[in-house]
Amino acid sequence: MLKNRFLALSLLSLAACTPGPDLAESPKNAGITKTESLPENRISAENLAKWRKGNPSWYAAVEPFQVIGEDGAGIYYVGTEGLGMFFIPTQDGHIVIDGGMPDQGPMVADAITQLGYDPKDIKILLNSHAHLDHSGGLADLKAMSGADMIASEGDRSALEGGFYLGSEDEEFLFAPPVKVDRIIADGEKVSHGGVTLTAYITPGHSRGCTSWTMDVEQGGKSYEVLVFCSATVAANRLVNPPQYEGIVEDYRSTFDKTRDWTPDVFLANHPGFFGLMKKRERQRAGDPLAFVDDQAFGKFITRVEGWFIDALQKQSAATTP
């Protein structure tokens, strides 16, 4: 049963990365929730090997590069062909968004080193959502740098418990637990070293799914960058029983909230969402604004909302007597 569950999840996760069939800072200690000591890391080498085999793009190397920005500032890509992780250097230490799979913290650190920075100087860790392919490497990055982990209340329990909310006993979905040092709320800002990011809670894919925006200067102009959490259904149960109470309402609220967003630069934790490889090719060919497209996110979220509607109909029909 677990083997079949794993295969299904792998396929769903891969599907989430590909086109559909039609195609001012709070005080440092504000919001911290006291918790008991973290549980042990329960993920096994055997399960990681299965994830690697089922999702090879998640482990396919991509040379780290600057997405947009000048003079060492801006935002850099430090992920793989299938998983998006992002690095934001500042004069006072650095910021990382997402850590990839449970064995990829050192890989992210190596990418940062390749860019000429010291991963030990990471000061802030941010997360899009508490699923092992995005939160898995955060514990290692925190251990090597001593950085503060900032996350939403909705995802705190999963991050600190090392589980997938609603599938707490599913061993294939375990992640290394990571302590949350500060809780972030919708619309709250994280400012560090002259860089300010704004958190937007966009729940559904996870209960505390968090999208991040920041402004980046290039060529004398400011560009709004969005690192979107996700809104795909993937492995989530929408009904009977839902992955968590209120999940359908959360998805709908996220679509309502984001439908009119027009960020200049759309990034996400799965490169397939925003066409990383093609845009990187254009950038390497000499286009410094290859990632600028204020229509890209709108097209994406419209497509994903259609996938959600289809998934809800199919799951509801499958459970109707």
Image (tube, grey):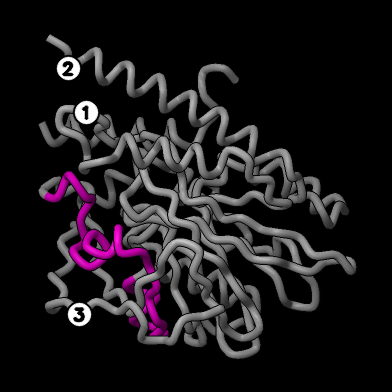
Tell me whether the residue at label 1 lies in contact with that at label 2, contact meaning CB atoms closer than 8 angstroms: yes
Tag 2 residue? 319
The circle drawn on residue 34 is 3
The amino acid type of the residue labelled 3 equals: Lys
Task: Name the secondary structure under disc 2.
Answer: loop
- Residue at figure coordinates x 56%, y 46% from the top left: 271
Q: Number of numbered discs present?
A: 3
N-terminal label among 1 and 2: 1
The amino acid type of the residue labelled 2 equals: Thr
Tag 1 residue? 239
Q: Of all residues shown, which one is farthest toward the bottom?
A: 92
- Residue at figure coordinates x 33%, y 77% from the top left: 31
Where is residue 283? Give x, y as percent.
79, 52
Residue 55 in the image: above or below residue 196 = above
- Please provide the residue range marked out in magenta: 139-168
Q: How crowded is mark 2: few (under 14 residues within 10 Å), some or many (20 or more)?
A: few
Residue 65 in the image: above or below residue 59 = below
Quadrant location, the N terminus = top left
Where is residue 125? Give x, y as percent.
44, 73
The amino acid type of the residue labelled 1 equals: Val
N-terminal label among 1 and 3: 3
Spatial CA distance of label 1 from label 3 is 32 Å
Spatial CA distance of label 1 from label 2 is 8 Å
